Amino acid sequence: MTTTDADRGQVWLERNRPDMAEVEFRKALVDDPENGEIHAMLALCLVGLDRYDEALDEAMRALALEAE
């Protein structure tokens, strides 16, 4: 089984390390920039880093991509 950047980001987020998770989610978005779920996870990281304006932007992007 291959571990993806998004998988590693999830692990870091579960370990309460939003700084490390952000790095992995941003790498994942390079490969899949239209993935709303990854944008949502990145938004959670940014909230954990008290970067609320960026978090809101990512959350809005996630909603636009995953309108369903």
Image (cartoon, rainbow, N blue to C red):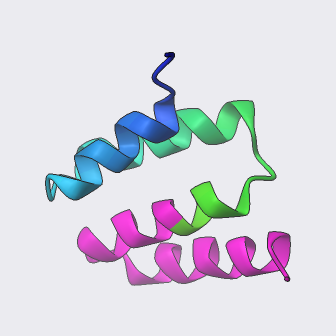
Q: Is residue 25 left or right of residue 12?
A: right
Residue at the image point whose x is 26% and y is 42% from the top? 20
Q: Position of residue 26 (x, y in %)?
A: 53, 42
Instruction: Give the farthest residue toward the front.
Output: 1
Residue at the image point whose x is 74% and y is 53% from the top? 35
**Above or below for 32 versus 42:** above
**Above or below for 17 versus 68:** above
| 41 vs 54, nearest the viewer | 41
Q: Is residue 24 magenta?
A: no
Q: Position of residue 19 (x, y in %)?
A: 25, 50
Q: Main secondary structure of the magenta part?
A: helix
| 61 vs 3, nearest the viewer | 3
**Above or below for 43 versus 6:** below
Q: Is residue 47 left or right of residue 15?
A: right
Residue at the image point whose x is 26% and y is 77% from the top? 50
Q: Which residues are magenta?
A: 41-68
Q: Position of residue 48 (x, y in %)?
A: 25, 72
Instruction: Give the farthest residue toward the top.
Output: 1
Numbered circles on residues, count = 0
Q: Is residue 53 magenta?
A: yes
Q: Quarter of the image holding residue 66?
A: bottom right
Q: Is residue 21 left or right of residue 62?
A: left
